[in-house]
Amino acid sequence: MSRLTKKQKILSALVVLLVMLVSGAGAYTRSQMSRESDLSSLSQVKEAISRHYVLPSDEEPALITVVDSSKVASGYLRGKVKNGDKILIYKNLQKVIIYRPEIDRIVDVGPAVIDTPNQTNNE
């Protein structure tokens, strides 16, 4: 039987450690990608956000996915959203929740200013 030298033992340990790190990083990346791609429906987004925030139960929100943050015109949202963010809008409660799936965090919660057309009285 041949005995491993100290250098060979260290090298073997480093190779095993490297393989473990690469495997772990790959698994983490796959889980992040699948979590982000799974957020295509309102119920999935609400489930992700509800892990961090108690969502209102008396209203069903509208869901918006930010595709081009440079085109966000709202003063409140401008500068707070990035491409890929999910925005829940509660019209009656006048609340906006911005969720960033890539970091699994709520970025901001604030007022929803919703413009409604004025109804004119034609009498």
Image (spheres, rainbow, N blue to C red):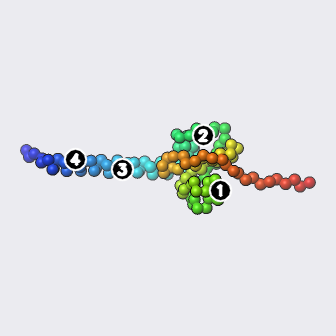
Q: Which residue is mark 2?
A: 55
Task: Check if mark 1's residue and mark 4's residue have beta carbons within 8 Å.
Answer: no
Image spot of residue 42 (x, y percent): 59, 46
Residue name at image x 61 percent, y 61 percent: 71
Measured Cα–Cα span from mark 4 to mark 3: 18 Å
Marks 3 and 2 sit apart, C-alpha to C-alpha, by: 32 Å
Q: Which numbered mark, 1 or 4, is in the foreground of this view?
A: 1
Q: Earlier in the sequence, mark 1 or mark 4?
A: 4
Between the residue at mark 1 and the residue at mark 3, the CA separation in whole angstroms equals: 38 Å
Q: Residue flagged by tag 1: what amino acid is it?
A: Ser
Q: Position of residue 83 (x, y in %)?
A: 54, 57
Disc 4 residue type (three-letter): Ala
What residue is disc 3 on? Answer: 25
Say what secondary structure mark 3 lies in: helix
Q: Earlier in the sequence, mark 1 or mark 3?
A: 3
Q: Which quarter of the picture shows residue 54?
A: top right
Report the front residue among 117 and 33: 117
The image shows residue 58 at horizontal and vertical percentages of 66, 38
Give the percent coordinates (x, y) of residue 17: 27, 47
Say which residue label 4 marks. Answer: 13
